[in-house]
Amino acid sequence: MTDRHGAHPRRADSQADPALDLGAGVPLAEIPDGATLVGEVGGERVLLARRGSEFLAVGARCTHLGGPLGEGLVVEDTVRCPWHHACFSLRTGRALEAPAFDALPRYETRTVDGRVFVGDRLAPDAGKGLDTSAGDGVERIVIVGGGAAGFAAADLLRREGFAGRVTMLSEDADPPYDRTMLSKGFLQGAKTEDELGIAGPEGLDGVTVRLSTRVAAIDRAAREVRLADGGSVAYDKLLLATGGAPKLPDMPGADHDAVRLLRSLDDARAIVARLREGARVVVMGASFIGMETAAALAQRGCAVTIVAPREKPMAGVFGEAFSDMLRALHEENGVDFRLGREVAAFSEGEAVLDDGTRLPADLVLVGIGVSPRTGLAEDAGLEVEDGVRVDATMRTSDPVIWAAGDIARFPDPQGAAPIRVEHWVVAQRQGQTAALAMMGRVAAYDDPPFFWTKQYDLSVRYVGHADAPAEIRVEGDPAARDATARLLQEGEVRAVATAGRNADALEANEAFRRC
């Protein structure tokens, strides 16, 4: 979404003293203008920020996954989380940009005799709530898809007080959940289903959510969504957030019960049900899903082999130095690699490679990419070209239909050609942009794409977009998992990847926003 927070970023670099009691007061001289300080109030971690003679206090932990905001980036009256780049208002505590949706707690402050005191905790800003007081005559927004973009749009419509009805149609049997956790904590056994929620329980208050509901067609003339069960839902504005479908391997044995995809919570449940200590798992593909699931299952005690056609895992995204770093990390954890190879068949408990090698396999996990689910848009006559073509507001070629997430082909904020990005935070922020646009607000998706991957105890963050970098400049020591890679196209840095350097990723994010 358009950044309205000013152009003078400052790394928080907060003094963080767990014993510092902000309720007892801090001398003003210890907090210069623009500085932040982390301490405690009533046993809770609090971030105190100074803006001239004004002091603002909010919770010090990101409401997404608990990232330390004292290590984040402050820009004007906002702070951005160092882990997954959620952005919050220091004034209201409100979550301004995904992946966080819940507001930070706020605290009152007062200045007395040259000291600033942090006082009572204030109610968080939960948003306005949907306004349906006008009855049947209100505007109707229908969201097709219950994933990242769909939830983010519905949540923002609620928080902004949209005066109308919102209906979400989801093929999933489960309410919206954090899909990124499936290939990480959930498969590892470190996260339960109860810990997969995206936001607090009020996130979909007032939204009509229809699960296990498949949309068969869009009737643009009648402005109706036709359902597979024969029903229909009328809309005034429509958001398509149908996501992507995992690619299926074209090989004998692909339909065997031991060959599994990972896209939904149901998929993850089925995989976990087949696992046991020491289970032999062959992972097809060294993509994000492949590498993350390999790490999760290795930590669970499985014997994991990654089979992939390219010689350098993830080198096309991060470059060879980071590829070597990730491969070494996996090998340290017992993962075997068969690179330059493909799984050609599954038979009798074995994965058969294209060179004839037979690998014992209790489970074959397929992670060879996804395809955008654009069928509804194509059948409806929308403009489709490697995704649904949208403008910066996420509006399609039909003025009352928007598209967001994996299916959206949108103007690159850093370049001329449109791009399509299959990442969680991008989808969430595009859903938020579409929600604002459907409400008639001024909105444009101009955020630099951001994603992360967590494998074992290492998080790699990536900001920007560089399809085919001509040059990669590496700073630091990837072997020590402390490095920054700058990816250049036409002599300009178009993307930045970091390992162990959260501040570099934050600063790159802000620099791209100012371009």
Image (cartoon, helix red, strand yellow):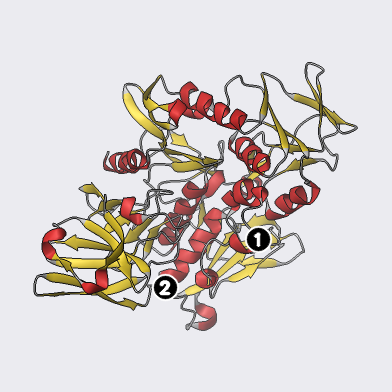
Q: Can see residue 223?
A: no
Going 37% across and 33% down the picture, which residue do you hit? 415
Q: Give the left or right position of residue 88, taking residue 207 as reference.
A: left
Residue 291, by quadrant, is top right
Q: Residue furthest left?
A: 113
| Between marks 2 and 1 in the image, the one whose residue lies nearer the viewer | 1
Going 60% across and 65% down the picture, which residue do you hit? 168
Q: Amino acid at mark 2?
A: Ala
Asked if the residues shown at circle 2 and circle 1 are in contact, with their CB atoms under 8 angstroms apart, the answer is no
Mark 2 vs mark 1: which is more N-terminal?
A: 2
Q: Which residue is mark 2?
A: 126
Viewer-proximal residue among 216 and 78: 78
Q: Give the left or right position of residue 296, taking residue 4 as reference.
A: right
Q: Secondary structure at mark 2?
A: loop
Q: Give the left or right position of residue 354, taking residue 323 as reference.
A: right
Asked if 259 appears above or below 181 in the picture, the reply is above
Q: Which residue is mark 1?
A: 193
- Tell me where residue 113 appears, x and y as whole percent: 9, 74
